[in-house]
Image (tube, helix red, strand yellow):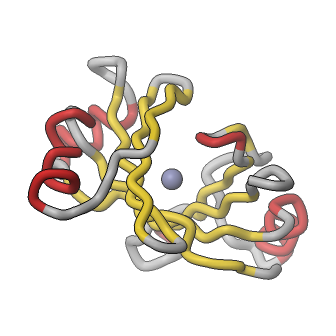
Amino acid sequence: MKIKRLAHIGVAVKSIDEVAKVYTDVLPLQLASTEPVGELRTGFIPVGETSVELVMSTEPDGTMAKFIDKKGEGIHHIAFEVDDIDEAVEELKAKGVPLTAEKPWQGAHGARVMFLHPKATHGVLIELCQYPEGH
Ligand code: ZN
């Protein structure tokens, strides 16, 4: 497995519009794009080679809404960009690392993503993502 960079830090929020103000009004950053992903909406705030990804639920009882009910808003996951997600997933399975799904699925920005189960990572939800060529 080759990890290229820390792609983003995912932050669970109730409202992208509200929370983005912290980054755009308090800090000198920009909300570059927002995008629906299944029952979620994501907003990307680029910072050099990486981004802050704001993630909100569009369903009142969605996964992210439940996370916020339990733990409040805040850091949810960190994402590493890999060059080959299928190879990475095979490698992790061979090592017996628990994953949150059987196969990679489609995330924001056309990326294919997989999460390592936080019970295998001492409490940090780690996302691996592979972006399409030329992204
Ligand atoms: Zn993410």
Q: Quadrant of residue 41?
A: top left
Q: Quadrant of residue 51?
A: bottom left
Which residue sits at x=74%, y=48%?
Answer: 112
Q: Is residue 127 left or right of residue 21?
A: right
Reply above or below: 92 against 51: below
Number of numbered discs:
0
The furthest residue to the left:
26
Q: Is residue 5 left or right of residue 74?
A: right
- Residue 81 percent across, percent down from the top left: 67, 68
Q: Is residue 51 visible?
A: yes
Which residue sits at x=56%, y=67%?
Answer: 7
- Residue 12 percent across, percent down from the top left: 29, 47
Q: Is residue 16 left or right of residue 122?
A: left
The furthest residue to the top:
59
Which residue sits at x=43%, y=45%?
Answer: 32
Identify which residue, 126 or 29, lies in the foreground: 29
Q: Quadrant of residue 63?
A: top left
Which residue sits at x=79%, y=79%?
Answer: 95
- Residue 18 percent across, percent down from the top left: 15, 37
- Residue 49 percent across, percent down from the top left: 54, 73
Q: Is residue 77 visible?
A: no
Reply above or below: 5 against 85: below
Identify which residue, 40 or 99, lies in the foreground: 40
Q: Is residue 92 left or right of residue 39?
A: right
Identify which residue, 10 or 48, lies in the foreground: 48
Quadrant of the drawing holding the N terminus: bottom right
